[in-house]
Image (cartoon, grey):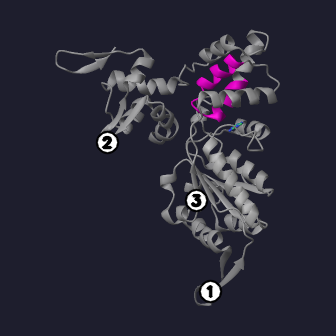
Amino acid sequence: MSIISDKQNKNKKIDINAKNPIVKPETNEGDKSFENSIRPKTFDAYIGQGALKETLKITIAAAKKREQPLDHLLFYGPPGLGKTTLAGVIAGQMGVEIKITSAPALERPRDIIGILMSLKGGEILFIDEIHRLNKVAEEILYPAMEDFYLDMTTGKAQTVKTLRLPLPKFTLIGATTKAGALSGPLRDRFGIIHRLQFYTDEELSKVVTRTAGILNIEIDKDGALEIASRSRGTPRIANRLVKRVADFALVKSDGKIGREIAKAALDTLKIDECGLDMTDRGLLKLIAEKFNGGPVGIETLAAALGEDVKTLEDVCEPYLLQAGLLQRTPRGRMITPYALEHLGLKKRVTSAQQSFFD
Ligand code: ADE
């Protein structure tokens, strides 16, 4: 597996990790070598995404039988769910090399042309954050994906010549957290499109146990489940929490992770039973206490919290929405009864029929 460029991190606008690295699913520099060292390499070792794995196994077996490369694949879904890992597993199953890059690293035409020309037959090109690909790079990709050639132009004005360069048959695996932001023509060129789901607590506790095993950390079932249940359905977060809880267990106890030590560690980190951190709770409390439970516009919330809208939308909201703690309506965000219960707030109705919370 080769990772082509790290330029994307320089270009990243959202960096909530700088504030709170623990329960936000975006990758950060510290995660990368750790993640690479614990990545499962086979479908058997890859936990969760059961239905998707079964479909992929059939797709791979069929491609192998036909002795053809896989169709181009698009994975979408929230960050941290294992899109890159899954692409690596697929490459392993196909017995081919994978080249990993990300759309912000493909700024100039020569970036994408260089990578395409470096591919060998059957190899996989993985482009993360593919919704951020610029128009020129997209235009270069279309014929490459469809008919495996590159159109290169040389000369200027009247003397311009187009050179058609054949490429080896390759598979593009694109990954995005925003399938809706992908242009129609690009989306249409993927033969297979799959959504990755949040993980259940049981699946995440298996991820936690596996990671602890690799790191030589002793953990029991209850300890693993405690970490899993506060990991927002996201393996990247679960894996980070394993390390933080292990530090706590080593310093405060005998290094072994059971339920009590996991609870104590996560409480100290201010990560609650739902996996919410202070920013999430701040957002929910703001809606409840200052905006009467909502609906309230995201811009208003962002201004009140001193966050930017994209951070709230891309980093905080996906999990709050899926966990049933927040609702998105045409008139703005609303807190749910479940969130009120979780925060220990009660709905109070005044004589003027105005409801607010205490
Ligand atoms: N680490 C991150 N994602 C994983 C997964 N799906 N299975 C096992 N380990 C993982």
Q: Residues within 10 Å of mark 1 (few under 14, many from 20)?
A: few
Badge 1 or badge 2: first in the primary sequence: 1
From the viewer's perspective, tell me whether residue 154 is left or right of residue 332: right
Q: Which region of the structure is painted magenta?
A: 221-243
**Residue 3 visible within the image:** no
Q: Nearer the viewer, residue 331 or 96?
A: 96
- The residue wearing badge 1 is 160
Q: Magenta residues: mostly which secondary structure?
A: helix
- The residue wearing badge 3 is 133
Marks 1, 2: nearer the viewer:
2
Q: Position of residue 302 (x, y in %)?
A: 42, 35
Which secondary structure lies at badge 1?
loop
Q: Position of residue 223 (x, y in %)?
A: 68, 18
Which residue ends up furthest to the left in the rendered image?
352
Badge 1 or badge 3: first in the primary sequence: 3
Q: Is residue 257 above or below residue 209?
A: above
Spatial CA span between label 1 and label 2: 51 Å
Residue at 62% x, 40% y is 81
Badge 2 or badge 3: first in the primary sequence: 3
Q: Is residue 181 above or below residue 112?
A: above
- Which quarter of the rendered image does ligand 1 occupy? top right
From the viewer's perspective, tell me whether residue 306 is left or right of residue 241: left
- At label 2, which amino acid type do we have? Pro
Q: Position of residue 283 (x, y in %)?
A: 43, 27
